Amino acid sequence: DAGVIQSPRHEVTEMGQEVTLRCKPISGHDYLFWYRQTMMRGLELLIYFNNNVPIDDSGMPEDRFSAKMPNASFSTLKIQPSEPRDSAVYFCASRGDDGTSSNTEAFFGQGTRLTVV
Amino acid sequence: LAKTTQPISMDSYEGQEVNITCSHNNIATNDYITWYQQFPSQGPRFIIQGYKTKVTNEVASLFIPADRKSSTLSLPRVSLSDTAVYYCLVGDPGSSASKIIFGSGTRLSIRP
């Protein structure tokens, strides 16, 4: 497997524009996580899905942020409208559930560096 | 979720053994301890996980005392390429509501 694939790798957009980040998890993984990383706030969990269903979106900063997982192989994180303070690196990660009690290894994508000007 | 506390930063030299300790006083019975490594401009990468005593793999060792209120990640003979941020996480992997929450991490700098 090629690992978790995120696109685009870099995105520069103007304030007020809609931004869509994409993620393809590792095939067979049941969990998908979206994170945001900044120098000030570190690595924050925004939302995570289990079997395509959103389980916890308490980390989503505001209504401008939304995430979907229409099928097991694709997820999007949308920001509408975008603001300069949304500038960050956004990571997607996936994790499998092999039925053991000790599996917490999550695999991260390379991230999308978003700059809102 | 059990809160973790680890040093903000550490410095060491090539060839030395580095030990990073993490405190997790409120660890629950079903919680495991997991460490991740993050290089600049990359996503975090799983290093090692354990429940008690000692775990060793090709990258590191993890020491967990009997009371499990702390853990120590040991990196043998570090090199410049071990410069990264190291995160200690505590959680119940068997729970269907298992979030993966990262703290501030320890920024490890290795010098020649």
Image: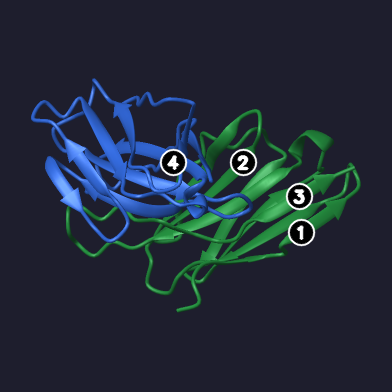
In the picture, one chain is green; tell me its letter. Answer: A
Give the residue pinned by disc 4: B86
User: Which residue is disc 3 drawn over?
Assistant: A114
Outermost residue toward the left?
Answer: B66
Q: Residue at x 52, y 67 (%)?
A: A4
Residue B43 in the image: state x and y as whole percent: 54, 54
| Residue type highlighted by circle 3 | Leu
Identify which residue is drawn at 35% across, 26% down. Answer: B4
Task: Quickly name the residue at label 1.
Answer: A10
**Callout 1: SS:** strand
Tag 3: Cα neighbours inside 10 Å, few (<14), some, or many (≥20)? many
Q: Amino acid at mark 2?
A: Gln
| Gap in angstroms between the C-alphas marked 1 and 2 | 14 Å
User: Are discs 4 and 1 located on one and the same chain?
Assistant: no
| Chain B palette colour | blue
In whole angstroms, how far apart are the C-alphas of marks 4 and 1?
A: 25 Å
Disc 2 versus disc 4: nearer the observer: 4
Q: Are marks 3 and 4 in contact (CB under 8 Å)?
A: no
Q: Which residue is mark 2?
A: A37
